[in-house]
Image: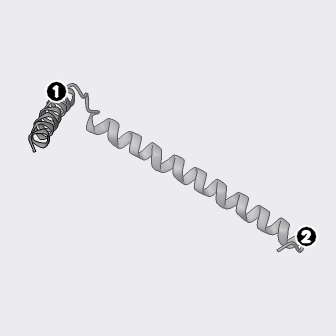
Amino acid sequence: MANQTKENINFKEAAMAYFKSVKLEWGKITWPGKQQVIVETIYVIIITAVFTIGVLALDTIFDVIFKALHLK
């Protein structure tokens, strides 16, 4: 039973040390500004839309080709 208590104390100390270091590192984070977040979100939406349209176009082209060859 003494070993369990010692292991629990070691676990608690390790957990506390971990969360203290997380809190310390959290303070070092440089967060982007609101304008940068908005602009990069718009870029992601545009790029996603372009790739989606590209995949749709390729799917349509292959569908037409396969129907013409009677493979579908």
6 vs 52, left or right, is left
Mark 1, residue position: 24
- Residue 54 position (above or below residue 66): above
- Horizontally, is 69 left or right of 42 in the view? right
Q: Residue at x 62, y 57 (%)?
A: 53
Q: Which residue in the structure is indicated by mark 2?
A: 69
Q: Nearer the viewer, residue 38 or 65?
A: 65
Q: Is residue 34 left or right of residue 11?
A: right
Give the residue type that dot 2 points to.
Leu
Dot 1, how many residues are within 10 Å of its Cα: few (below 14), some (14-19), or many (20+)? Answer: few
Position of the N terminus, as image quadrant, is: top left
Quadrant of residue 28 within the rendered picture: top left
- Tell which circle, 1 or 2, labels the residue nearer the N-terminal end: 1
Q: Which residue is at the far front?
A: 1
- Which residue: 33% across, 36% down? 36
* Mark toward the viewer: 1 or 2: 1
Q: Quadrant of the C terminus?
A: bottom right
Q: Residue 44 has which mark?
A: none
Q: CA distance from mark 1 to mark 2?
A: 64 Å
Q: How many marks?
A: 2
Q: Position of residue 21 (x, y in %)?
A: 18, 28
Q: Amino acid at mark 1?
A: Leu
Residue 23 x %, y %: 16, 32
Disc 2 element = loop
Please name whichever residue, 21 or 26, is drawn nearer the observer in this view of the structure.
21
**x, y percent for residue 19:** 16, 35
